Image (cartoon, coloured by chain):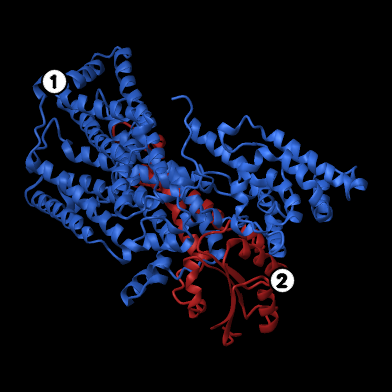
Chain colours: A blue, B red
Amino acid sequence: MSHYIPPFHEDDLDPVEGRTNLILTHPTYSELTETVAHPIENPHKVWWIFFMAALSLLSLAGLSVGYLLWEGIGIWGNNVPLGWGWPIVNFVFWVGIGHAGTLISAVLFLFRQKWRTSINRAAEAMTIFAVICALMFPTIHVGRVWVIYWPLPLPNQMDLWPNFRSPLLWDVFAVSTYFTVSLLFWYVGLIPDIATMRDRSKTFIRKVAYGIFALGWRGSHRHWVNYEAAYLLLAAMATPLVLSVHSIVSFDFAVSQLPGWHTTIFPPYFVAGAVFSGFAMVLTLMIPLRVWLKMDHIITTKHLENMAKIILLTGTLVGYAYAMEFFIAWYSGNPYESFAFVNRAFGDYGWAYWIMLSCNVVTPQFIWVKRIRQSPFALFILSIFVNIGMWFERFVIVATSLHHDFLPSSWGYLTPTMWYVTTLLGSFGLFFTLFLLFVRFLPIIALSEIKSILPQANPHYVDPKDDDDSGQSATGEVESHAGAPADEEVSSAKVVIADSAAIDVQPPDKPDKKPDKAEKAAEEKAAADKAAADKAAEEKAAADKAAEDKAAEEKAAADKAAEEKAADKAAEEKAAADKAEAEKAEAEKAEAEKAEAAKAEADAKDKKKAQSDAFTFKPPADKATDEEGSS
Amino acid sequence: MAKRSKTYGLLAEYETSGALYAACEKVRDAGYGAWDAHTPFPVHGLEKAMGMKSSWVPWIVCVMGFSGAIGGFLMQYWMSAVDYPLIISAKPFNSYPAFVPVTFEAAILLGSFGAVFGMFGLNRLPTLYHSLFNSKNFLRFSDDRFFISIEARDPKYGLDKTRTLLESTGALSVEEVDD
């Protein structure tokens, strides 16, 4: 593969920013609202099938947990030395899954990754539901759920306080803070969209329900300013928070003195693993969802591809951590440590280790292949493998270090009972029940955010279709609105571009929009045009203006001399510009006035150069192509 | 309450964010104070066109975050070293390195409360009833339309004068909203 040229259309470019549009098919604001509100207002029958399936799994959880509370955790068979068993495996697994949601909503927000807007809502919901599932496990694992409030620093009759030196207590604070902050973050993001649902509601119940949760939101910009500040700061706080949470979860292991757990690599390694598994879960959820809810123009292949790349990165980091653990075990010279790792790979749990390794290290490497990472089906399969692999990673970590205690007399092997399996399946039931309710009642796409990344959301935007005659018709309005944002940081230069027919030309800095045309240098074209323009100007009206710069001359030509000079100059210029003519012809078809010789000349000159700007937006096009190609 | 009139004010509707932006500048330059823009999404840079000052939310978050950190640490210190000192794993009563995680989490938790509830407070949310909802057309703010509302309580407000101003900004429609 020599050089990848992405399927590219001029229509796919954002005219102001010059980047490829993230939302395809050029929806209007209200079309997006319709698309997102449709599954809520006209639920699919299939939803009930999924929901019933999820509910039955949830009832399995109810059954298992009920029996557990009645009988005690003996039903799991948790025993020394494997006291932690599956519940802690499941806890770490679910917390890890949650991390992708925060990564998408907070970290990518701080990095100004606009593609996050299509997936952040659903990913945040996934975070919250995953954390709920996670919290379930330590809660029931303590055995006496009715005293689960003991880790909280509450005054009590014994005048005792929790032990703040224990990582398990840090975990209580970390995970509960994480849950609270994620919920707030999610809700704050939802407010404008709940308001949209409220304003569309037809029934009384919906009006009241959405109305209460929308808090009376009225899109006031005075509110938006505070809202955006709050959102940014929440993102800024959630970012270190998410890193801290899985670091603290890893402290549960790393702060202990057990071989195989007591390693400094654990915090970063757990965080990478969490992001890895979380993104896999996002893919698992979003790939069917985008097809089912017909949102594949909002959650595009590009989104999936970006997530796949993050999976590749974090999967490779995890692979590195696996290797480094072994290296350090050998390098430390500590026989217990070395044994723990040799035993991990080749001992009783060797089978689990190799499942983990192949799922987590080998599977993501397929993402290097572009065809695989652009195929939703392949990514879906791959994400399932990653989910399985990451569950096994936690299992391997918990089981292998515990099952061989320091004395061979206290070695053991964990054989899962039926109740282990039902509780795990039940937690999936809980997760999917919550997620399906979310899909049914809340906008799964952050509407206000995707609207804000549409090209027309930018106040600098001028519709190319309107722009053809903007020179004549809308001058006043366009001018005021083009002039206004010029003092602003956002690429003001490009606004002028959209108006180029009226205002003037910007020399194209990146001449060609397609690589194959690169040789027909735009410089040539530009030179020819300019020469022609110069001549025109000089001959007719611009003899006195010769001292002025070329732009001025062109303007003069266009403004004053165009009509008179048109007839005789026409032939000359056409000849000079013939090369570009073919390309331009299509674009100009639309313009009826082009037919008029008089205007045509002046316009032709400008258009040729500015065509990219006014119409096809060449320079950005080129940039976007490069980006795509190099990525 | 005192100066409550029958009209809430005028509501002008715009089709694009660009038109809204230009209109906001005109209203700002005309010197109005009690007015607002209503948009389906935050239009970037609009606060400049509206002549607004920056948000207070960061200061609230800053104060709350530091109180969380200080409070979180003092709580642990008081519980572990003052109120009921216990020797655990031969660690000192004030084993401050072990207090770092909870201190950090407390700072984040209170900071987030500051961000969210501070924002609610500054925005006076929830406000379930608002006069603007008397306009049926206004509900399109959450879909695809952009609005400017100028309140009647603004000293510069005059029904005809303000209407002329709004109409001169290229509004699709200008309507009077009941209070």
Q: Can residue A305 be seen in this view?
A: yes
The residue drawn where x is 34% and y is 54% is A294
Q: Residue furthest right?
A: A544
Residue at mark 2 to residue at mark 1: CA–CA distance: 83 Å
The residue drawn where x is 72% and y is 67% is B29
Q: Residue A157 carries which label?
A: none
Residue A263's x, y, as percent? Answer: 32, 25
Residue designated by label 1: A407
Using residue B1 as the reference point, say whether residue A543 is left or right of it: right
Q: Specify whether disc 2 shares its chain with disc 1.
A: no
Tell which subunit mark 2 falls on: B
Specify few, some or many for label 2: CA neighbours under 10 Å numbering under 14, 14-19, or 20 or more. few
Residue B36's x, y, as percent? Answer: 59, 69
Q: Can residue A268 be seen in this view?
A: no
Residue B86's x, y, as percent? Answer: 30, 40
Tell which subunit mark 1 falls on: A
Q: Is residue A93 above or below residue A51?
A: above
Q: In this view, does A217 lie above or below B88?
A: below
Specify few, some or many for label 1: CA neighbours under 10 Å numbering under 14, 14-19, or 20 or more. few
Return the residue nearer the eye: A518 or A97: A518
Q: In this view, does A495 lie above or below A515?
A: below
Using residue B3 as the reference point, say whether residue A376 is left or right of it: left
Return the residue nearer the eye: B70 or A262: A262
Residue designated by label 2: B31
The residue drawn where x is 70% and y is 37% is A525
Q: In which quarter of the image is residue A48?
A: bottom left
Residue B139's x, y, as percent? Answer: 47, 73
* Proximity of marks 2 and 1: CB atoms separated by less than 8 Å: no
Q: In which quarter of the image is residue B84?
A: top left
Q: Which amino acid does label 2 sit on?
A: Gly
Return the residue nearer the eye: A106 or A405: A106
